Image (tube, coloured by chain):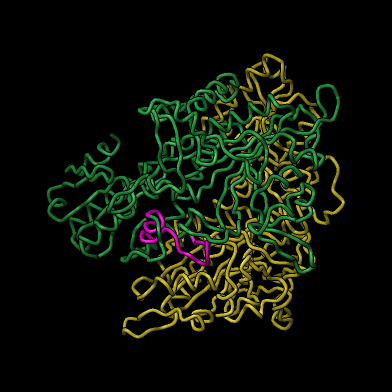
Chain colours: A yellow, B green
Amino acid sequence: MRLSQYFLPILKETPKEAEIVSHRLMLRAGMIRQQAAGSYTWLPLGKRVLDKVCRVIREEQDRAGAVEILMPTIQSADLWRESGRYDDYGKEMLRIEDRHGRDMLFGPTNEEMVTDIARSYIRSYKELPLNLYHIQWKFRDEVRPRFGVMRSREFLMKDAYSFDIDYESSKAAYDRMFVAYLRTFARLGLQAIPMRADTGPIGGKLSHEFIILASTGESEVFCHRDYLEMPVPGEGVDFKDAPALAQTVEQWTTPYAATEEMHDEAAWNALPETERLAARGIEVGHIFHFGTKYSEPMGATVAGPDGKETPLFMGSYGIGPSRLIAAIIEASHDENGIVWPMGVAPFDIGLVNMKPGDADCDAVCERLYGELQAAGHDVLYDDQDTRAGAKFATMDLIGLPVQLIVGPRGAKAGEAEIKLRASGERETVAIDKVLDRLKA
Amino acid sequence: MRLSQYFLPILKETPKEAEIVSHRLMLRAGMIRQQAAGSYTWLPLGKRVLDKVCRVIREEQDRAGAVEILMPTIQSADLWRESGRYDDYGKEMLRIEDRHGRDMLFGPTNEEMVTDIARSYIRSYKELPLNLYHIQWKFRDEVRPRFGVMRSREFLMKDAYSFDIDYESSKAAYDRMFVAYLRTFARLGLQAIPMRADTGPIGGKLSHEFIILASTGESEVFCHRDYLEMPVPGEGVDFKDAPALAQTVEQWTTPYAATEEMHDEAAWNALPETERLAARGIEVGHIFHFGTKYSEPMGATVAGPDGKETPLFMGSYGIGPSRLIAAIIEASHDENGIVWPMGVAPFDIGLVNMKPGDADCDAVCERLYGELQAAGHDVLYDDQDTRAGAKFATMDLIGLPVQLIVGPRGAKAGEAEIKLRASGERETVAIDKVLDRLKA
């Protein structure tokens, strides 16, 4: 993408309303724009990051055997009356009346709707296990939305729902999602720690929040230092091997880890002081096992091996991609701007033409731009006629992992400079060697 | 994807509520499920088609220089009061009050919001031209939603908005989108004819609807037969060559073409009878040039070359991917089911194992499934132990372009059968030659 043809509205001043660093940087880098309280437009740079985060989430959901669907945002209140949550949910639910006076709502979550889908199609235990997920906009009418997309009212959520014939197989479904979440966060460059959690309005007994440690986190968390070194299952993990997955989950849930709400002072104090890690954390995922909480009242039953109708055992599994992006920035930035981990960066490479109009600079940049794209790189090419200082400041602010800088002297000598955003390391490389160097 | 691990809820009976063939086939093929009046879940097969259609739309928008953003679904009523449309829009707009009593609405379109974005960032004509698009769910509270996703209340829309400094450049922007639309529909296997259109609540003077001809179309349309043979610009079209694009638009708008509303009996009767084509049509896209209709009341101005503030010249360009899928099916089906054009089919190939459990069949199918995927094909592998008749009926119903059938005798002899869905042509091919044959 050529910057001259892109829409990257960088803000020079730090917006006053932004209280936390991710909000400030997302506004300054032209990633988002507030449209109303807790409601944001994703500008082109932000949209690219959102797509990349969703792609990683999708790949790991698919790998774990979940199947993608897409449910509508607007739901009928009648479904929620069946589960009993319509009256329970409170003012966070955005209630709507349509032109015929029917009660509708903007879905804050989809347990009822997906249970309705399951009960209308699934007849037999032979069609299980099944896990259906979607990535769709949700609305929760928070009293005081703040922190940008970290706590907005309209937000994107990936929510998966598992259906099984009994507790044992639904625990295996829970384990699959647990491991998929470990992998997802690791691929996004985040160290996420699963912590036993309160189940709130979703319900059920077994639940984990995935928390990343960041000094700007919203709440205090307490965990064993061992988590910092615990290995995340690799790409080859076998999602059909239930015992191995259960063992991974066991390993990841045995050392002490708790949010403030679930904190147990006695257990905590029993740990040697050198093993205690008290920090601030941001919730980036939440998984629930709630058995038959929805299937029973809603009549979602299937025939078991004995022919008897049994209510489905269910779990639900949420990740908020929009919030996740803010969390990544909280965990990965410096005084100059964002430092994107590879894999979620909006572009891999920022190609900087220091002197557009200079024949050498233009020729070298055009050549590199073409070659890098042909090699599969996402390149943002700054072809604009602006000051060097502004160019560098923008590149640092938007945090692309690699900057490739072409100035008139270097271009004449057949050289470009590679700068790594994370380390600040710089290296001069012959034009012919740039592609090879970037591979390494 | 293995069918045993997929979620493909085929319906054996034709649902009574479905009045048109696309609605019937989408329900029967397990593509969609109705959740409320005019509101649908996209089941896995439908979601895949939706993604493929959106991908084609995106590629052509990007090629034409539009930049993707994502605006929220919920909008503030205040914005719509600025343009004067809040009161004008009528009961089709879903009006909402939030917990603080603020007036909101579920966006039926985004002219106001995108104008607000433009006025807050664009300062100078030097930042133009700009075209911002997004693909987002819209809601229009139709009195009587029907025909499945053809006329639903919650529907997906790609809407693009162009910003220019004067009429001439905004006409060039209109031409770019016009040509991008011709290409988009052609890639989706549709013959779309642009027709002068009424501008309705969007406003402006210049507008075209893109209509595809289908016997089940919602309205009568009238056009010159020449349209059936008119060449659509190829992949190499240069979107920077404004005069060439204007010429293409000229060519595509000169012969007679009109919807019922705009029909001119005198002009029609002046055509030789052999050149007249009266048919039924389905609207699949609609583009508008409305100049300063929104920028003036909303104060979206930029500095021109002379330093004077000028209101932005704008256009908007809509395609409904969800409705488009129904239109594709209306135009491409037979008595056995859907016939997907290549490029939007949910999977390219349906691999049918006629006798799962038979060692030869299983071995051949596993090998082909692996090889086809490695070669980049999307394959749905029917590995289920069901009757041959049911397998064939399902494959025909879901309309994958190629069926690859492996039975026990063929497997023993090292052969498989290729069946093309569209023509019904069958061919027996040696297992080793399957990949080469599919390339051709």
- Between residues B269 and B429, which one lies in front from this camera angle? B269
- Between residues A27 and A418, which one lies in front from this camera angle? A27
State the extent of the magenta-drawn residues as a range.
Answer: B21-41
Q: Position of residue A12 (x, y in %)?
A: 84, 39
Q: Please tell me how many numbered marks the rendered image carries.
A: 0
Where is B412 relative to A280, above or below? above
In the drawing, does residue B421 fall left or right of residue A118? Answer: left
Q: Residue at x 81, y 26 (%)?
A: B304
In the drawing, does residue B66 fall left or right of residue B385? Answer: right
Q: Position of residue B400 (x, y in %)?
A: 33, 49
- Between residues B428 and B419, which one lies in front from this camera angle? B419
Q: Evaluate whether residue A123 shows in this view.
A: yes
Residue B33 is one of the magenta-drawn residues: yes
Q: Evaluate whether residue A199 shows in this view.
A: no
User: Which quadrant does the C terminus of chain A fall into?
Assistant: top right
Where is B440 relative to A137, above or below? above
Residue A141 is one of the magenta-drawn residues: no
Q: Residue at x 72, y 16 (%)?
A: A357
Where is B81 relative to B262, above or below? below
Q: Position of residue A285 (x, y in %)?
A: 62, 65
In the drawing, does residue B25 fall left or right of residue A146? Answer: left
